Image (cartoon, grey):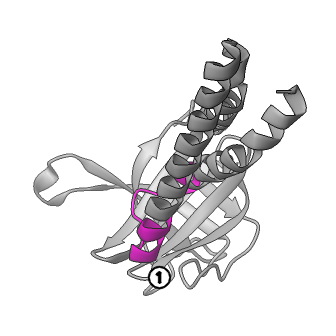
Amino acid sequence: MTFLSQLSRSIPLTISGLYLAYQVTKEPTGIGVFDGFWLIALAIITAILLVRTWRKDRAAYVETRSVKSYLSSLIGIILPALVFLSLRTNNPTVLYAIFDRGFEGASIKFRQDGTYQLGNISELGTQYVYGQYQFQDSLILLDKSDLADVIESKRLAIRAITRLGGAGNDTLLYQIDSTGKVIPNSITFALLEDNRKMK
């Protein structure tokens, strides 16, 4: 069996594995029903392709007794795994905040490379919006507003509030106008992760 034939046999598994790695990496903590079904279906498809490729490699090994027969399976496993690890580690999260309303809500993730991912979560799925941001002291400046019926302003303010009874502080992400006032009835995010070097 030639290298090209082994490579072509690994293509379906590799593509499916890469797409699964990307989907798992970009998902927020909360996902919609359809998103969950899609991820499960994608994982099943990838598993079927892996078993199919492995069986063909096994048959080739029985015939040739060469460990190179498993090259197709190894490519289909190792390449998506490396991509998954790269996506997880090379662009770490600086800030992560959520708005939780039971089965509905929103999440916003600010990456170290200056990009953000906004997820509008509902029972039917998650709508994603991507863009760029900049820090300005305790402000976050987005590249656009009116995002996914969640964000109304380009300006987000990071503010700490004291809990009732004085039992510690919570850090919230407010939407503010050009004068620094909180926009009435706008969504407020709870900050869950803050990895800034200077707070």
Q: Residue at x 49, y 51 (%)?
A: 96
Residue 190 x, y percent position in the rendering: 38, 60
Residue 188 position in % (x across, y down): 42, 71
Q: Main secondary structure of the magenta part?
A: helix
User: Which segment is the magenta one?
Assistant: 24-38
The amino acid type, in three-letter code, at marker 1 is: Ser
Identify residue for label 1: 186
Indicate the secondary structure of the residue bearing disc 1.
loop
What's the residue at 57%, 44% (across, down)? Answer: 52
As displayed, is residue 187 above or below residue 12? Answer: below
Query: In the image, is residue 35 part of the stretch drawn in magenta?
Result: yes
Q: Which residue sits at x=71%, y=30%? A: 75
- The image quadrant where one finds the N terminus is top right
Can residue 92 be seen here?
no
Residue 189, image quadrant: bottom left
Does the magenta portion include 161?
Answer: no
13 to the left or right of 106: right
